[in-house]
Image (spheres, grey):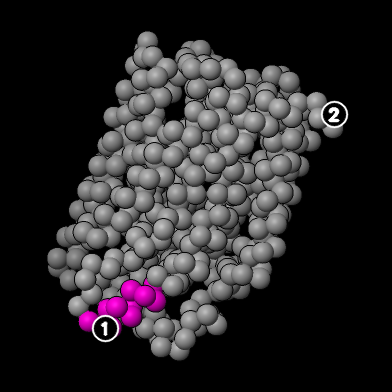
Amino acid sequence: MYDWVVNLAPPVSLEAQFEAATYRKIAWRLMPFLLLCYILAYVDRVNVGFAKLQMQRELGMTDAVYGAGAGIFFIGYFLFEVPSNIILQRIGARYWIGPIMVVWGVLSAATMFVTGPVSFYVLRFFLGIVESGFFPGVILYLTFWFTNKYRAKMVAMFMTGIPLSGALTGPISGWILARMSGVGHLHAWQWLFLVEGIPSLLAGLLTLAYLTDNPAKAAWLNDREKRMVLNNLHAEEELKKRTSPGNHKLSDAFRSVDVWILAFIYFAYVMGNYGLGFWLPQVIHDTLTINPLYIGWISVIPWGAAAIGMVLAGHHSDVTGERRWHLTLAGVLGAAAFAVSSLPGISGTAGLAALTIAAIGTECALCLFWTLPTGVLSGAAAAAGIAWINSIGNLSGYASPYLIGTIKDRTHSMTLALLALSVCQLIGSALTLYVTRKRRAASALS
């Protein structure tokens, strides 16, 4: 299943065979577990999209209130992401990621006690604070193990947690909403938060026992394997220092123009991601079926297709060594598909097909994006820069659901909202061409 994680096209030496086998061993050890954790994180972040189908009506929320509550998660996320990543670099992933998973599982489950807008906003805000250390922490953590040669595949595999969370939890959430109403005197949407919050708590406890901070501490690697991995990482760090001077100290992350451009690129792509994550169930409800069980199963289609696309795009990008056009064309594909889905009068089936293509383009762009900052930042700048880029980018997690909710309240249609997501993907693609052109010119001069 995971043979694709290392390019085994005929090794030229025994050393190359040994390297491929070692990275395969590391990938088998780390990636399935990290993927599982990200699926749980993403479920707890966006399951309000399904809960909305009943919670909004029962609590008397408007679309704008729901959008603000769904998005306020990312304000807390923004404020604490950089310090969280710096802490992870200092104390290690094991003792940072494990405890925050336990806490966010509790907070996610506690959303079942929401009684109105204020309690909804408060719980979502604190959930964002706690989750802020996970995603950028794992992106940084992967740089402790894998060189840029393998990183697109690793990030792609990790980020398939986004579409897989939709594909796996859509049917589960739909079943809960269809079957659990009134059980134990609770609403079905309350059961949804409770059932989907507990696994994160359990996975956090498991993380404390399972995760290894870095190759030097890996008892499951022998001495030769450790030396090879550490030597490769050291060589890559030296190359970064020669080709990207001034991107290694903590302060460099905030002074670099490229870091700010990368943050805005990520913002543009994430707009599409959360537009789908928070509103896809509503689009299906409005155009295809009002049955929550069917909505859950239909939502598998775009997320399942996106998961396959991410793996193939990440693998092909690593095999060819090409990043610029893989990323740009993925963004353009997402933009075109969002534009088609926004056409007035489009049928429900055609709209779903367009949103499936939009999901493929958007998710491929998101996973390929992370090869850019991890390829130029190192040291303290990597910890802060990755977190800062993700912080700025994920502010669109607030902007996207709030913008769509406001547009829908005022126009009673998703047409302009979907068109706005298309424009964001185009802006991200244009900025990608600009910043990668600068990098290519700098590399040619070095």
- Give the image quarter of residue 442: bottom left
**From mark 1 to mark 2, how far is it between C-alphas?**
64 Å
The percent position of residue 355, horizontal first and vertical second, equals 39, 29
Tag 1, which secondary structure? Answer: helix
The percent position of residue 439, horizontal first and vertical second, equals 23, 59
Part of the protein shown in magenta: 13-23
- Give the image quarter of residue 295: top right
The percent position of residue 444, horizontal first and vertical second, equals 14, 65
Residue under label 2: 185
Q: Which mark is residue 14?
A: 1
- The correct choice, above or below, for 75 with respect to 1 in the image is above
**Residue at the outermost right position:** 185
Tag 2, which secondary structure? Answer: helix
268 or 297, which is in the foreground?
A: 297
As drawn, is 413 to the left or to the right of 133? left
Type of amino acid under label 2: His
Q: Residue at x 47, y 67 (%)?
A: 28
- Give the image quarter of residue 362: top left
Q: Residue at x 56, y 54 (%)?
A: 36
Type of amino acid under label 1: Leu
Q: Residue at x 20, y 78 (%)?
A: 12
The percent position of residue 161, horizontal first and vertical second, equals 49, 49
Q: Is residue 17 magenta?
A: yes
**Residue at the outermost front position:** 1
275 or 306, which is in the foreground?
A: 306
**Which is more foreground, mark 1 or mark 2?**
1
As drawn, is 420 to the left or to the right of 216? left
